[in-house]
């Protein structure tokens, strides 16, 4: 029988907040002489699998970077295919997400999404808001720098006393308000950069990069990342 790294994980030291930069869908499709959209479709299946595995492992917050503020620059057909996939995701998964007690949230400015996609995702958030399990943050039209600027605008516009501002209280103005910082950031797809993802929340996260393309990122890859995380010595600036 094939062994799984799951058996080697310390279930008492599962990272509380895991972020994943979804990358490699296009290359996965290209390698198979398929259109890029086929890669995104397969990528959506991995989102389904990894959300379930994360929730089963006891991860409390899972943040997925699905569509960045820069992704609008892609060809129109690709952007609309991604927006349609969002609707397909909600239609096909909302029941399962609810059964798994997942709370769906968004990070990013979803007001710019096409109406049907926005409505689908809002429905998912509304339907799952009373759940008590894992929080799934979907990064949609998300960019960390604009999140930080938005935070500053909110501070100024709400006449918040700037003298009261601390590194901790600033977090209340981010999309991830009331959530812990990232413990582990995973980037599949071979690139080693943050691409404007959760720059404030990533401050003390362990970074894990791997060459596996996102559509090939099955649950064993997640276990590998967490196993690696558990081997790190997190000092948070101490000794
Ligand atoms: C990056 O791969 C991936 C994206 C920009 C989109 C991610 C979307 C999904 C996984 C599917 C839909 C998700 C949800 C939540 C329904 P890339 O296209 O940049 O890959 P490449 O670097 O190989 O070109």
Image (cartoon, grey):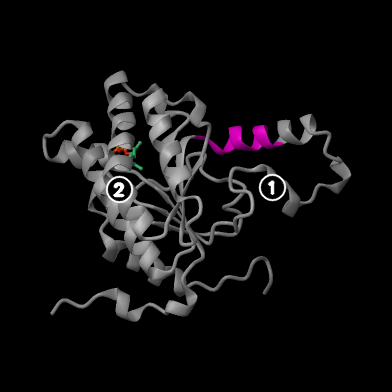
**Mark before the other along the chain sequence, 1 or 2:** 2
Between 101 and 145, the one nearer to me in the picture: 101
Q: Is residue 69 above or below residue 164?
A: above
Q: Is residue 125 above or below residue 6?
A: above
Viewed as shown, does residue 46 lie left or right of 29?
right
Mark nearer the viewer, 1 or 2? 2
Magenta region, residue range: 142-151
Q: Position of residue 213 (x, y in %)?
A: 27, 49
Majority secondary structure of the magenta segment?
helix
Q: Position of residue 107 (x, y in %)?
A: 52, 41
Quadrant holding ligand 1? top left
Q: Is residue 149 magenta?
A: yes
Q: Is residue 132 above or below residue 4?
A: above
Residue at 49% across / 31% down in the picture?
110
Q: Position of residue 99 (x, y in %)?
A: 35, 59
Quadrant assignment for the C terminus: bottom right
Q: Is residue 79 above or below residue 198?
A: above
Q: Which residue is mark 1?
A: 172
Using the rendered view, name the quadrant where residue 237 is placed. Answer: bottom right
Q: Is residue 144 magenta?
A: yes
Label 2: which secondary element = helix
Residue at 38% across / 54% down in the picture?
98
Residue 12 - label:
none
Label 1: which secondary element = helix
Q: Position of residue 141 (x, y in %)?
A: 47, 32
């Amino acid at each position: 029988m094939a062994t799984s790294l799951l058996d080697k994980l310390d279930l008492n030291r599962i990272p509380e907040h895991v972020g994943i930069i979804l990358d490699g869908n296009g290359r996965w499709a290209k390698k198979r002489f398929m259109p890029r959209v086929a890669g995104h479709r397969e990528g959506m299946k991995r989102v389904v699998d990894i959300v379930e595995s994360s929730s089963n492992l006891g991860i409390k917050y899972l943040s997925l970077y699905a569509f960045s503020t820069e992704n609008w620059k892609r060809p129109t057909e690709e952007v609309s295919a991604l927006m349609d996939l969002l609707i397909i995701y909600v239609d096909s998964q909302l029941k399962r997400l609810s059964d798994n007690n997942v709370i769906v949230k968004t990070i990013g400015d979803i007001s710019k999404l096409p109406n049907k996609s926005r409505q689908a995702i809002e429905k998912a958030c509304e339907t799952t808001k009373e759940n008590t399990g894992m929080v799934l943050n979907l990064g949609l039209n998300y960019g960390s720098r604009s999140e930080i600027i938005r935070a500053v605008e909110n501070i100024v516009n709400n006449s918040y006393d700037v003298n009261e501002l601390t590194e901790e209280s600033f977090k209340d103005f981010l999309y991830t308000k009331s959530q812990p910082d990232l413990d582990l950031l995973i980037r599949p797809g071979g690139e080693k950069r943050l691409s404007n993802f959760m720059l404030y929340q990533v401050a003390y996260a362990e970074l894990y990069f791997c060459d596996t393309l996102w559509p090939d990122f099955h649950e064993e890859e997640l276990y590998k990342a967490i196993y690696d995380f558990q081997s790190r010595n997190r000092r948070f600036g101490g000794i």
